[in-house]
Image (tube, helix red, strand yellow):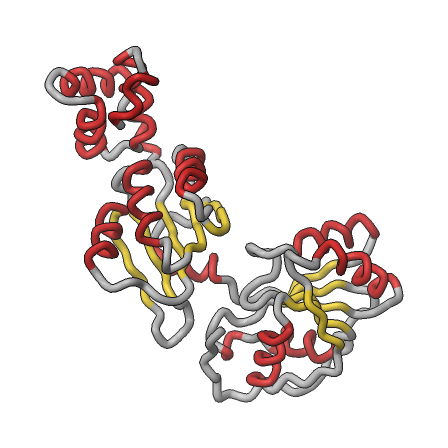
Amino acid sequence: MGYILHKDPLPGSCQVMTPGTLTLVATPIGNLGDISPRAAKALSGADIIACEDTRVTRKLLNLTGTATSARMVAYHDHNGAAMRPWLLDQLADGKAVVLVSDAGTPLISDPGYKLVAACRDAGITVVAVPGASAVLAALTVSGLPSDRFMFAGFLPAAEGARRSQMTELAELTATTIWFETPARIARSLTDMADILGPRDAVIARELTKLHEEILRGTLDELAARLASGPALKGEIVLLVAGRSRDDEAMDDAQLAAMLRAELEDQRLRDAVKSVVEMTGLPRNRVYRLALELTGDGPNRRQDA
């Protein structure tokens, strides 16, 4: 995890934490200047800090000059089931426990929600110290609609599962946000261009860091750009516009007429591609109707 050192000193005073309370503390996603005074005080005053990776959190504390006598313990996917009862016991004994992730806001794409749910069930108070979030930072700079959005975590690594999730979310009218790895981003964009059509999309890379980069374009444009250019590096947030509400302006009767015309001299696959390019409609909607028109969907599927 790379950080940019912020030269302005953080307030050094320590705030006494509330005993028996779980505090969720957001940490910087890259720029150390984004740690808040309240977050620093919470970390300083904790009895226990539950970390995704204790090495990363120790580095953050050292770089920000945040002194703490807290016991640091690992809490992640692989040990969560074993650690939760112990943490609940510590909270019941009046210890002030802070939960952090490696970067950003806890519970966003990490196992913290299970600890929070267990605390709620046990009647233990949970409070948040808000701050940096890669999801919200990417959304705000993307220029995509932000009145409604869905965060879908990391895209599945397996192609079949990845395409299945894209198809499942294709009808959403909200902006969809994913985390993706540099090794898979090009393939994911190609799949999305095929399934979702030429929607607007944004790649937000290395947010708040020295090499921050925002790439905008349609899905097919971004897919072509990555296919012909150097591989992306760093941490990536991928945002895709939702299905346009104007999609419904073309009813199935109009769409069917276009498909019939294209199917007269083209294979199903090529006819679907032509109609998607002409209308900008999601491929899965056009393909589904094309299968209904041909009447032999299973026999045609290999052409699509």
Look at 71% across and 82% down and name the residue there: 68
To which quarter of the image does residue 48 belong? bottom right
Residue placed most toward the observer, 153 or 183 = 183
Q: Is residue 277 left or right of residue 156?
A: left
Residue placed most toward the observer, 73 or 238 = 73
Can you say which quadrant of the picture contains the C terminus? top left
Q: Is residue 194 left or right of residue 157?
A: left
Q: Residue furthest top?
A: 295
Q: Is residue 169 above or below residue 86?
A: above
Find residue 243 and report its horizontal and vertical position in percent.
35, 36
Look at 43% across and 50% down and name the residue there: 177
To which quarter of the image does residue 19 belong? bottom right
Find residue 49 and report its horizontal and vertical position in percent.
71, 71
Q: In this view, does 288 lie above or below 105?
A: above
Look at 18% across and 25% down and name the residue there: 271
Q: Is residue 34 above or below residue 160?
A: below
